[in-house]
Amino acid sequence: MSTFTKNFILVFLVLFAIAAAISYGQSKRETPEVLGISTLVQHIQKDNVASLTVKGSLIEADLKDTEKKHEVRKEQTQSLTDLLGPFNIAPEKLTTIDIKVESERGAGYWFGVLLPFLAPLIILGLLLYFMGRQVSGMNNRALGFGQSGGHEQKPEDKKDKVTFADVAGSEEAKKELEEIIDFLKDPKRFTKMGAKIPKGVLMMGSPGTGKTLLAKAVAGEADVPFFHMSGSEFVEMFVGVGASRVRSLFQRAKKTAPAIVFIDEIDAVGRRRGAGLGGSHDEREQTLNQILVEMDGFDPNIGVIVIAATNRPDVLDPALLRPGRFDRRVVLDQPDIQEREAILKIHAKNKPLAKDVSLRKVAERTPGFSGADLANLLNEAAILAVRRDKKEIQEIEILESVEKVLLGPERKSRVISPKEKEMTAYHEAGHALVAHFLPDADPVRKISIISRGRAGGYTLKMPEEDKRYHYRAEFIADLAVALGGYATEKMMYGFDAISTGPSSDLEQATKLARAMVTRYGMSKKLGPRTYGEQEDLIFLGRDIHEQRDYSEKWAEMIDKEVGDLIEEGMAIAEKILKVKRSLLDKLVKTLIEKETLEQEEFVALVGARQQGTKTKVAPEETEQKLVPKKEEPKKTDDEWDF
């Protein structure tokens, strides 16, 4: 429905309400009885008239024998004498009657006279007024089309103010940004020394690591205006609008300098130019050119610092990264265990946690979680506690929320047959046993055969400490663990009965093996080099094309090496499962009964992990299958060394 139609309906309803109110008020009054002139004359002849009141074309008659009001209508210009004269009424009859003549020269008289003429004019005027407002609004939007739509957060807005106290972790990033804060507070301290503060700060990091929050904290610490706008807000369907909005944004910032301009997701407009797509008048490129000019052009910005955030620094135009523009780069990594604990403490301030909740334990369970993931984790735990009618958030809600964030919600209502339940139990038990008896694999934290998300069951394994580097032995162990479910199904049900359950495991193992060969140089046969170059299609922003820098002969060798690595992992998994067959059956039986096993229950069932040993790999000259040789004597379970 258009604005004009809405305004028309509104005016109509208002006038209708006024007319209804007037009609209702008139209906409430007593309606007088209308008499004819001859009837009035008869009442006068009988001395039954007490008074007569003349009001324009009406004569109100007050009769002696009734209290009801009566009225007689006459012509507007006819007087009472002219009206009664032809009836030859005796003068003594009229002298006993109280006759009054009231003039209608007041506001009511003029209102009644002019209303029939003014009402149409008023309605027409209102319609023209609302139509004019609508057209004016469209003109204003048209004139302001190129104006910046950036949001400004003023220093006096204490409600939304963010400081470094609200940002946990990222200590190195905070130190890099402290110089920006000092300059905004006291720029003369730097200018006296001849120092120039960086005009642009580029914050790089994975999604959810706190780039936007840290930019707000800089403005909060410096107590300066904060203009924030997304990169996509500059670009419109009309050429030149983005550049105009950039100019408008910087003009607003200059008026309130010192100030901070924050551009989120700058890769939306700052991608590398010269791809030949979109032509020379591409709107995105014009917007980028204007940003470059505003940051370091003929009109330098005094006291305006630009902070930008991106998840894809590799696709940015080199002109943005040169000195004088975004010459300072702050990298935000995923938080380590200490930082995760600090982040959890911040997000737990307004949540009633039970006394036995250990945020340190939660931090140990969440390696690889970003700050946004941790905030979502505690929020999910709070929702789960409310759903269970609890007054406090207990540890069980937090641990369940970890799995919900990783894998999705539980699907307990899903009905599966006993055969599928048994197969799922063997599959997850295979993963768990292989991971438990390989020292290079991460320890098992939980096993469950309850469907969660798209997974029929899951084995949750997490490292005991944060890792920055990964080794070949760890990848071999990860291959064996990923193939543990497939190996178990093959051993228990035969090759022809293998299900589609291990499909994601096989995909994960294949990707890992190929990365070991082509990216990490972990193949002795192929040597320490990489194979293939990943290229970005700039306007699509995804790694969807790989340029082959090797021949077909090397491609065949790569495929063989990938296959050998997968066979090596498969051999390790099969050997462990054959040796630990009794523990496998015992674990499956317990899983079918309880459906979920925590780390303590699992360790109590299968025994402690081996310490101080590494996964042994067969010599290079032999076939890389870790199976015991036929001539070796049979060993017991405890004599095997993995």
Image (cartoon, grey):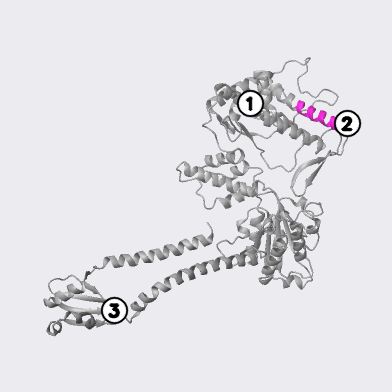
SS assignment at label 1: helix
Q: Considering depth in this image, is 395 or 314 the residue closer to the camera?
A: 314
Nearer the N terminus, badge 3 or badge 2?
3
Quadrant of the rendering where the C terminus is positioned:
top right
Query: What amino acid is found at the position of numbered circle 3 in the picture?
Result: Gly
Q: Residues within 10 Å of mark 1 (few under 14, many from 20)?
A: many
Residue 551 position in % (x across, y down): 88, 34
Nearer the N terminus, badge 3 or badge 1?
3
Q: Which residues are magenta?
A: 553-568
Query: Which residue is tagged 3?
Result: 56
Residue 57 position in % (x across, y down): 28, 77
Q: Would you say the residues marked 3 and 1 are in contact, meaning their CB atoms lie under 8 Å apart?
A: no
SS assignment at label 3: loop
Q: CA distance from mark 1 to mark 2?
A: 37 Å
Q: Is residue 612 visible?
A: no
Residue 555 position in % (x across, y down): 85, 32
Residue 623 included in the magenta stretch of the image: no
Q: Is residue 404 above or below residue 299?
A: above
Query: Which residue is tagged 2?
Result: 553
Which is the main secondary structure of the residues drawn in magenta?
A: helix
Nearer the N terminus, badge 1 or badge 2?
1
Mark drawn on residue 427: 1
Q: Is residue 505 above or below residue 279?
A: above
Mark drawn on residue 228: none
SS assignment at label 2: helix
Q: Considering depth in this image, is 7 or 191 the residue closer to the camera?
A: 7
Circle 3 or circle 2, nearest the eye: 3
